[in-house]
Amino acid sequence: MIWQIAFKEIYHNLTTLRFALILIVLPVLFVANSFIYSFGGYGYTAQVDTYNQQVTQNRNHIGDYANKGLAELALVGPGEIPKLPNPLTFCADGADKLIPRSVKMQNVGMLGRAGYDEFEGYQWRPPWILEYPLQNKSGSVVQRIKVDWVFIGILMGFFAILFTFDAIAGERARGTLSLMMSNTVSRGQVLLGKYLGAFVTLMVPLIISILINLLIIHLSGNIPFAPEHWLRILGMVGLFALLVSIFTFLGLFFSSRVSNAITSLVWLLLTWVFLAFVFPSLLGTFVGNLNPIPSVDEVLRQQYAQLGQLYDEYRPFDGSGDIPSKLSKAASAEDPEATRLWAAFFTKEVETKTRFADGHIDQQFRQVLLARDLTQISPIATFQYAMEGLANTGIVGYMNFVKQARRYRQTFIDFIKTEDQGDSESLHIYPVKEGLSQSPVDPDAVPVFGEQISYWSVLTQVMFLVLFNLLFFIIAQISFLKSDLK
């Protein structure tokens, strides 16, 4: 009986104007998506070429300094670390063009001056630190609507509303609901039949449009897919199904609660607008005002103030005056004590700069995560975050990249110290050039950064989407059981 009701619903839906609308709109949107991201300004092929060039430059950088000696390599660091391009940006853009594509492990002198510093004839290269480049593109955030799969998913919620707002209220108004219930069929069977009818009607054109989209992208040759990408795309289709199911149950709930179809449509449209646009924006603004992040200038002022105290203590630029400098002697292999003093100064300087650089971006990450946690009350926001997680785009993908870069930072330092222990002529004092081995090191032995993509965070969003389905199914079922047939 359930499938009989479902087939009746499918047949009815196929004859409506709204089905003709979805048959036109969905393919157009997916074709537009394929052309925008395959042939438009997003240029995945160009991103891959740039990434390969950066990787080559990075290895050449390491090779050049490794041949000069372990000490030179230790001070300049591994250079710029590029982030992998995302072939699935067309699925979930995640404002990826506004997110930095690399982190830099480079030398910065006193108070941010690049190059060498000098004190009474002693010239040194400051140790490298991990820096996070800023993207000054805030003015271009709202240049155009991004026609990615997430945007289409939001519209699928709207289409689910169109197919369910009158599923029960319309039957009640026509008097056919009481006639249907006069047969040996339960209300639960009627509800599930109508759910399956709307769900199948929505998913079939959606899947066909997705196949058209993938075919165009594949034939263009601009975005090659690996086997793991196909698995991720399959997972995204599953996310579409969960979102469509949620709004189908939501539509059936309102349709069973109100007396006429127009009222049901109004309430559903208000709910959709609130969940898709109003609620995430309000919570994002609230979180930003609740815990404002200091500006870059403010962070730099605080950093300079602490570095100023450090420079007053060690006086690296001034050995004259009433207060003698702790660094009155140049570091050298013949003077281990002076070399250790310079090492202590460099270590404190690097720790101070690292603490502020890491701390500032971690504050931003915490604020973003708080906003995401709160907005996951909306199934549309949860769907978006899950899509970005599978596509490895957006801020969470960058957060994972930064965490891995930090682990690589420590791996590189450990490698330098381990290699240095093998030189009996070295003082084994890090991070001073004169305290480390001057012998060349095999460039191939230097650790290579490899970005690993994790999808564990997506499980949380999938769980939330499943819970939303169960919740809306229960409230739709209860509402229909308590509703009048006339």
Image (spheres, rainbow, N blue to C red):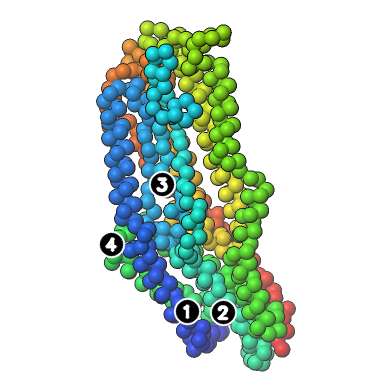
Q: Secondary structure at mark 2?
A: helix
**Residue under the image location 52 percent in, 15 percent down:** 314
Label 4: which residue?
221
- x then y, percent, for residue 264: 66, 79
Which amino acid, by three-letter code, is at mark 1? Ile
The mark nearer the N terminus, 3 or 1, is 1
Quick one: 223 or 237, which is closer to the camera? 223
Mark number displayed over residue 235: none
Label 1: which residue?
22
Quick one: 390 or 329, which is closer to the camera? 329
- Calculate the distance from the C-alpha at mark 2 to the C-alpha at mark 4: 37 Å
Mark 3 or mark 4, whichever is nearer to me: 3
CB within 8 Å, label 2 to label 1:
yes
CB within 8 Å, label 3 to label 4:
no
Q: Secondary structure at mark 3?
A: loop
Label 2: which residue?
162
